[in-house]
Image (cartoon, helix red, strand yellow):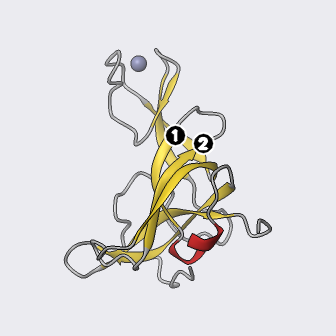
Amino acid sequence: MEPETSADLPPMLPGIFTPPPYDRNPPRLLGGYCPGCRKYLFPAPRYCPACLEPTEKTNLGSEGTLYSFTVVRTKPPLGLPQPYSVGYVDLPGSGLRVFSLLDPEAIDRLRIGRPLRLAAGFLGHDGRGSSRWRPYFTPLKNQL
Ligand SMILES: [Zn+2]
């Protein structure tokens, strides 16, 4: 997936990943941390749903492992490519398993257990036809 160069367009959902440009740092997922429960949360709620303490913003990194996935071949919503793929990705360190878009150009390389990294690019639109940045996980380049 080759992202366009403009960093001016807003992300689909602000606050869940670091904004472009990515020339110095790759995109990273942003979540929450509850100091009371010592639990990570994604996406970050303002308050912990378990103990109602305010959560702290935290960087969840850009790496993960594919836990499970599916390929969707029906007409996609929001201008997503056809087919596209979604899956659950385990994030190291936080114990989180997040639901995410997967790289539609790497569907043939998706395997359960495969290491992934977060990417971001223009995928689909916002429902009104305007392009939006979306985060998605893609297999590491050196993995066949
Ligand atoms: Zn809590």
Q: At label 1, which amino acid type do we have?
A: Arg
The residue beneath circle 2 is 91
- The crowd level at tag 2 (other Cα within 10 Å; few <14, some 14-19, many 20+) is many
Residue 60: x and y in percent read: 57, 43
Which label number is shown at residue 8? none
Q: Residue at x 61, y 72 (%)?
A: 108
Closest to the observer: 52 or 73? 73
The quadrant holding residue 55 is top left
Instruction: Check disc 1 and report its element: helix, strand or loop.
Output: strand
Which label number is shown at residue 97? 1
Q: At label 2, which amino acid type do we have?
A: Leu
Closest to the observer: 58 or 77? 77
1 and 2 marks in contact (CB < 8 Å): yes
Cα separation between marks 1 and 2: 6 Å
Residue 127: x and y in percent read: 21, 73
* Sequence-first tag of 1 and 2: 2
> Does 10 sit left or right of 99 as displayed?
left
The quadrant holding residue 82 is bottom left
Residue 2: x and y in percent read: 57, 83
Q: Please say if 85 is above or below 60.
A: below
Res 17 seen here = no
- The crowd level at tag 1 (other Cα within 10 Å; few <14, some 14-19, many 20+) is some
Ligand 1 within 8 Å of disc 2? The answer is no
